[in-house]
Amino acid sequence: MLQKTLYFIFIIAFLFSCTSNTETKEIVSTPKEETTNYDNQITQINDVANRYLDLGRFSGTLLIAQNDSIIFNKSYGLADYKTVKEFTDSTAFKVGHLSELFTEAIIRDMTEQDLLKLNEKVTTYIPQIKQDFTVEELLNHKSNLQTIAQIQESNSNKAYSLIDYVNLSKSNNQENKVTETQSELDYNILGLIIEKITNKTFSEVLEDYAQKWNLESTYLQKTDTTHLAIGYLFYNYRNQGLKITPSPKYQDSMAFSSRGIKSTAKDVLKFANNFENQSFDVEGYLMNDGFSYSLKKDTEKQQTILILSNRKHPVAREMSESIEKILDNEEYELPLLRQEIAINPSLLKEYEGVYAMNENMNLTFVAERDSLFVVMGENKVELKPQSENQFFMNESDASIRFERDENNKVSKAILLDGFLTGNTILKVEE
């Protein structure tokens, strides 16, 4: 139970992670001279991808385009670890929030055809919705709707129905407080509007637009899922040690036009290139479906970096930022490997103390027998040193890095999940 409890606490912390110091012992310099064949950069990009693969955080396809030409396109790991199926150019991924880009493009094209107006109330198209917001507010996530998870928390016995959940969100949000997260209901409603106007299913409409955009393998639903990658988690499954485990499946009706689209790396690039003067910067992961992704298209640099992964770790953006630094001939960082090293035991005493995760929960660290332990109640778990100030747990894929203040005194720690950044917890007691 301790292992499960600790893992749960760390994961909860990561869900609310914030940007923090990124000091790490592995900082890599890129040669400053300009290159025309990208040989040096490609070697370092491979290093980045393989490091995250080795850590169990990434498995998927990495595609980089410069000046409309693909300069890097490579896959790592497997699309299906049970059948040992490798990735190919036709391997489709669940692209999560990237689905919104496709849905928005369809909506905007329909406005150009005068099929709908952005400033019209949603009730014009779906009168069953008892809400007062416009199509444009949905596009910009300004509806103030709660997320599906927030609604389910208050209505655990209520089966998902889009219109019912939208109306439930109204009653749950009577004070009109702005929600901190973007609701997937916004774009699911847009998908329903598309269906009402076209008299087609969203899947059929997406197929029509995929042909228009010259996309070969972009879809919402297919009977044949042969080319769809399997989503995976990497965690301590039933206390049997860290293992790659197929993730639970996200309900298709909930994913719909906000999270439900599947696509290949080359199709996503084609889609982005259809909008020549538009930059994209989208990243995220599917909490319940084992996929993560990052699309960064910079029109000024004429550069696109796309990462599609069948692992549920939100490291795609972190990888993308390192790759961008490599392409710009700047220093970049690699997360530390999960390898135990020998350190001076006297350092451990400096890390001892109580650290506040929030006002109701603390973590306590103690040094005993030349080892550092994290304590909860009567139970404790040993931490293994990766560097002089960073430690990992055998029981989960989480790590923790201790950091010092301007007086060289340990004052805080960063909860990591194999990342370079994470959630900061302050030391409150020695």
Image (cartoon, helix red, strand yellow):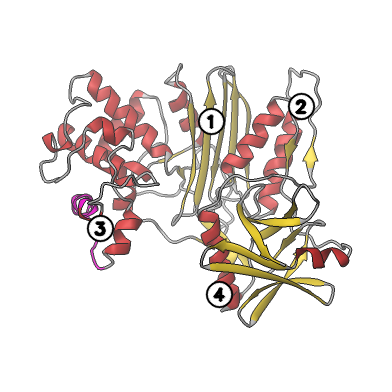
Which labelled disc corresponds to residue 39?
A: 2
Give the mark nearer the N terminus: 4 vs 1. Answer: 4
Q: Label 4 vs label 3: CA separation?
A: 29 Å
Q: Residues within 10 Å of mark 3 (few under 14, many from 20)?
A: some
Secondary structure of the residue carrying numbered label 4: helix
Amino acid type of the residue that numbered disc 3 sits on in the rendered structure = Tyr
Q: What whole-number distance in Å separates the C-alpha atoms at marks 2 and 3?
A: 51 Å
Query: Which amino acid, by three-letter code, is at mark 1?
Result: Lys
Q: Is residue 161 magenta?
A: yes
Where are the magenta residues, as a range? 157-170
Separation of disc 4 and disc 1 at Cα?
A: 37 Å
N-term-proximal mark, 4 vs 3? 3
Please name which of the two marks, 2 or 1, marks the residue nearer to the observer.
Answer: 1
Image point (68%, 57%), residue name: 413
- Return the x and y of residue 347 as percentages of the image width and height: 84, 63
Q: Give the residue at mark 3.
A: 160
Q: Which residue is mark 4?
A: 238
Discs 4/1, front: 1
Q: Nearer the viewer, mark 2 or mark 3?
A: 3
Q: Is residue 193 left or right of residue 232?
A: left
Q: Give the vertical position of 124 relative to 374 (above or below).
A: above
